[in-house]
Amino acid sequence: MDTVIVLAAGKGKRMKSSLPKVLHPFLGKPMLGRVIESVRKTEADKLIVVIPPFEVVERFVKDNYEDVETVIQDEPLGTGDAVKRALPLIEEEGYSLIVPGDVPLMDTSTLKELSGFKGKADLVVVTTVLEDPFGYGRIVRDKEGNIERIVEEKDADEDVRKIREVNTGVYLVRNELLHRYLDLLGKENAQGEYYLTDIVALAVKDGGVVKPFLVEDHVQFSGVNTRSQLVELEKIYLRRIVDKWLENGVTIHFPETVYIEPEVEIGKDTEIFSGVYLIGRTKIGENCRIQAGVRIENSTIGNGVVIKDNSYIEESIVGDECKIGPMAHLRPGTRLAEKVSIGNFVETKKAEIGRGTKINHLSYIGDAEVGEDVNIGAGTITCNYDGFFKYKTIIGDRVFIGSDTQLVAPVKLEDDVYIGAGSTITKDVPKGNLSLTRAEQKFVPGYTYRKREKMKKLKEEKKNQ
C-alpha cells in the first residue's frame, strides 16, 4: 500500500504569529491545504498529516479533508520523530512519499515522475542545486556519484558546506525501511533531534539502493519559514498563473498588479486591467472586459460581460453581455440574466434580475425578484428588513420605477406597472397600474424675497452691535 506523509508539525517561530505556520494563507488557502491538494493528485492509498498539538490545525484538516488521517507530534523532536509518529498507520509493504507541509509550490507532475522509481530503489531523495545553499542539508556523494549521506547545515564542516546540491525534504521510501530504521535513529547532533535524513546512511550501509532525483526547478520545493519568504513565493506563483493565461488567449495589462488564484478559470479574448483580484472558484467567460480595481470572489461571469472600474462581485452569477459598474457591489445570492445593466453605486443582494433590466445608479435591490426589461430609477430602495425579519420584493416584467422610490417589502409589482418618482409603495400594485404617493405641492408667493430682506436686516443689526 502506498502512503503520503505530510510533515506539518513545525511551530514556525520565525513567522512571529499566533497562527501555526502551515495555516498561513497562500493565495487564498492555508499553505497546508495547498500541499494536501498537490499530493492528493498522486492517488496514494492513504494520506497522513503529522500535525502539532494545536486544535486549530487538526480542525482545519478534519473539516476540509475527510479522507486525510492525522497524527500529533507533541514535541518538536525532528523529522525522524515526526515520521515515527505515523508509523503505526503505515503498512510494511509499499512505498511512502514524505513531503514538508510548507512547500506550497510543489508540482504534482514532479511527484508523479518521482513515483516512477518504485521497484527500482529502496530510497529516493529529491535534490536540487542552489546558488546559496545556506540552511539546507547537503547531499554528500561518493566517487561514483551515489548518495552517501545527508549532512545538515549545523552539523557540516567547511568542505561539506561548499556543496551546492541540497536536500529538498521530499523522499520516496520503501515502507520496510521506515519500519526497520526509525527506531535506530539517534539525536547526537547539533540540534538534538531525530533526523529522518539519517536513514540514508543506514540504508547505504546495509547495501540498499539509494538514488537521487535531481530537480532543476528548485523553487517548487522552496519552504516557507518567514513572512518574507511567503510573499516572495506568492509573487512567483502569481506570475506563473498570469503567464499561463497569457498563453491561453487572455490579455492581462500590468500583470504585476493583478491577483489571480489558482482555482480561477478565464475564457479566451478576455481583457483584464490593473489591480484586478480574481478569487476562489471564480469563472470568467470569453470576450469579457474586467476594468481596473475590480474584485470578483467565487462568482460566475458569462461571455461578453463588461465590469467597470472598482466594482465588487461576490458569490454571484452574471449572465452574458451584462454591464456592471463602475463602483457597483453585487453581494452573495445575486443572479443576473443576460444583458442586465447595473450602474454606479448600485448594490444588490440575494436578487434575481431578469434579462434586459436596467438599474443604472444609486440603488439598493435586496431580497428581490425582478422581471425582464425593468427600469429602476436612481435612489430606489427595496426596504427588505424591519429590524427582525427579511422580506421579499417581487417586480414583474416591463415595470418602470421612478427615482427615489421606496418599495417596502413584502410587496409585489405586477407586469407593466408604473411607479411615480418619490413614492413609498407599501401595497401590491396590480398589472398595468400607475401607483404614486405624494403630498400635494403647495406655493407660497413672494416667500424668497421676504426671506432675503429679513436676513439682510439681521446681518445689519449684528454688524452695528
Image: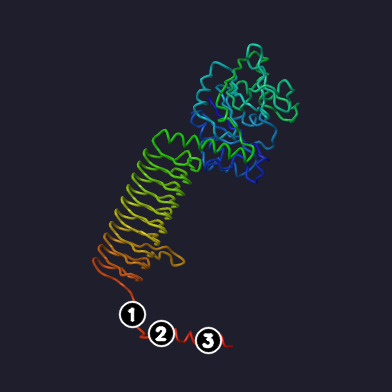
The mark found on residue 460 in the picture is 3
The one nearer the camera, 400 or 251, is: 251
Q: Which amino acid does label 2 sit on?
A: Tyr
Q: Distance between the residues labelled 3 and 2?
A: 17 Å
Horizontal side, residue 277 vs residue 204: left or right:
left
Residue 412 falls in image quadrant: bottom left
Residue 439 falls in image quadrant: bottom left
Q: How far apart are marks 1 and 3 (CA)?
A: 34 Å
Where is 20 relative to 308, above or below? above
Q: How crowded is mark 1: few (under 14 residues within 10 Å), some or many (20 or more)?
A: few
Q: Which residue is drawn at 46% across and 66% down?
A: 388
- The x and y percentages for residue 283 are 40, 42
Where is 255 relative to 190, above or below? below
- The x and y percentages for residue 280 are 47, 43
- The x and y percentages for residue 358 are 32, 57
Q: Residue furthest top?
A: 144
The mark found on residue 441 in the picture is 1
**Mark earlier in primary sequence (1, 3):** 1
Residue that badge 2 annotates: 449
Q: Which residue is drawn at 46% across and 67% down?
A: 387
Nearer the viewer's eye, disc 3 or disc 2? 3
* Element class at badge 1: loop
Q: Which residue is drawn at 66% across and 30% down?
A: 79
**Mark earlier in primary sequence (3, 2):** 2
Q: Residues within 10 Å of mark 3 (few under 14, many from 20)?
A: few
Q: Which amino acid does label 1 sit on?
A: Gln
